[in-house]
Amino acid sequence: MATYEAFDRGVEVNGQTVLTIVEEAMGRFSDEYRDRALDALAAEGITDPDPQEWYPQQTWLNAFETIAEELQPHVLDRLGEQLPAVAAWPNDFDSVAAGLRSIDEAYQRNHRGGDIGYYEFERTEERAGELTEEQGGSPRLQPWEESDNTRHEPRAIAT
């Protein structure tokens, strides 16, 4: 089983993000999945998520752990695939590289406090580059190469 542990206990998640993921992304699966996500949050003390509030990332991750245990871990993968469709996302980019750079902007909007980490894209060739994700540990590199049918939208973001 994956470990759901914040790298920095000072990090908080935006309440609008919590609501969007639970209501819209989980709600896309079914009302039952949405309700189970709300129950997982309530078990962590978030009984009525407020879009104007900020919540400890560890509380949010604990709810994800419960969701993974109750609904199977693959649900979180499917949830990640829903995020670009439901999350507030920068849309003022005109290239794949700029879209990949926008991942960090979206992540920064939705997290605060402590060492929240970052996403960084660096072009290494005309149609290739590396996306670095750093969230409190060693940076992880994801090679990226543009093809003629590369879609100009991000596929998922981390929470």
Image (cartoon, grey):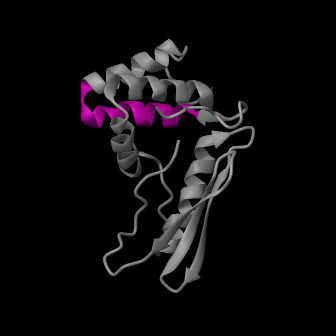
* Residue 155, placed above or below residue 46: below
Magenta stretch bounds: 14-31
Residue 10 is left or right of residue 40, and the answer is right
In the depicted view, which residue is nearer to us: 130 or 49?
130
Q: How many marks?
A: 0
In the depicted view, which residue is nearer to us: 67 or 3?
3
* Residue 146, placed above or below residue 76: below
Hey, which quadrant is residue 120 in on the image?
bottom right
Residue at left offset 33%, top offset 43%: 78
Where is residue 86? Give x, y as percent.
Answer: 38, 45
Where is residue 68? Give x, y as percent.
Answer: 40, 29
* Residue 86, placed above or below residue 11: below
Where is residue 121? Give x, y as percent.
Answer: 59, 68
Is residue 142 located in the magenta-colored stretch of the structure? Answer: no
Where is residue 147? Give x, y as percent.
Answer: 36, 79
Q: Quick check: can you spot residue 14?
A: yes
Q: Quick check: can you spot residue 56?
A: no
In the depicted view, which residue is nearer to us: 29 or 93?
29
What main secondary structure does the magenta stretch of the protein show? helix
Is residue 29 located in the magenta-colored stretch of the structure? Answer: yes
In the depicted view, which residue is nearer to us: 140 or 110?
140
* Residue 25, placed above or below residue 102: above
Furthest residue toward front:
1
Residue at left offset 43%, top offset 60%: 154
Furthest residue toward bottom:
126
Residue at left offset 53%, top offset 71%: 98
Residue at left offset 54%, top offset 57%: 103
